[in-house]
Image (cartoon, rainbow, N blue to C red):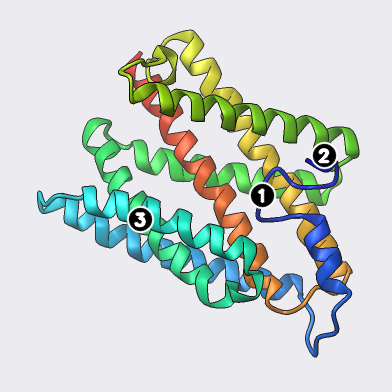
Amino acid sequence: MALFESNNPVLKEKTFQEASRIEYTESMTLGGTIGKMAFLLAMVLAASVYSWGVFAKGENTMPLVLGGAIGGLIIAIVIIFKKEWSPYLAPAYALAEGLFLGAISAMYSSLYDGIVLQAVGLTIATFIAMLILYRARIIRATEKFRAVVVTATAGIAIFYLIAFVLGFFNINIPFLHEGSLLGIGFSLLVVCVAALNLILDFDLIENGVAQGAPKYFEWFGSFALLVTLVWLYLEMLRLLSKLNNR
């Protein structure tokens, strides 16, 4: 992976550079990206409320979980290769992820009282903290920083893939789910890596604005940030569940 690429595969500096060489009547702005991000988050919330309600009624939510997860993955892949479609597909991705997150969150909530609010609060707090650190230039997206985060993220992705494959053979990696010190330590590491993704994403969005990326990149950048936030929230849920198990 190139040194200047974000570990978020849908948000790359090269992508912004290529798009900036094409002439458009309107260019990407930071304000526009923020507004579209807020819209996508509202759609995630609306879909989550719906799927949570389905769970609360005692109905089967597995179709929502699987449909949201698989549908979101397919839509994300399409957006990555057809970035100009992001104004139409990013809202669909938000709805799919909302259905998935709402059902998963309801399941966690039934097992651990208050865990969802805690996870949401920690995710928001982490986002704000990373934004402040980035804007204050306390943490800079240097070449070395990018390289470390990209390597760590790739390692986590490979590890999760191996664990997923082993699951088909009834082989489980205990600390992925248990509340041992090793399990909690692993989750803390993953949360930290997910949080550092935000620094890279902020930097690349800022570069996209500076380079005059086309207007539809506001949707693309918002979609990319949403991908990171979904991952961060899920890891927060996993970490809090382990802490509760202790």
Q: Where is mark 3, residue-wise?
A: 68
Q: Residue beneath label 2, please? A: 139
Q: Secondary structure at mark 3?
A: helix
User: Which element carries disc 1, helix, strand or loop?
Assistant: loop
Question: Horizontally, is 242 left or right of 189 in the view?
Answer: left
Query: Crowding near pointer 1: few (<14 within 10 Å), some, many (20+)?
Result: few
Circle nearer the viewer, 3 or 2: 3
**Foreground of the two, 93 or 84:** 84
Residue at the limit of the structure toward the left, as seen here: 58
**Earlier along the polypeptide chain: callout 1 or callout 2?**
1
The residue that appears at 52% across and 24% down in the rendered structure is: 187
Answer above or below: position of 157 versus 43: above
Give the CA separation, mark 3 to mark 1.
20 Å
Residue extending farthest to the front is: 169
Quadrant of the rendered structure where residue 159 is? top right
Which residue is at the front of the view, 115 or 165?
Answer: 165
Alpha carbon separation for disc pair 3 and 2: 34 Å
Residue 221 x %, y %? 67, 63
Check if mark 1's residue and mark 2's residue have beta carbons within 8 Å. Answer: no
Position of 221 relative to 69 (above/below): below
Q: Is residue 213 left or right of residue 178?
A: right
The quarter of the rendered structure image containing the C terminus is top left
| Spot occupied by residue 132 in the image (x, y as percentages of width and height) | 74, 48
Vertical position of residue 11 compared to residue 25: above or below: above
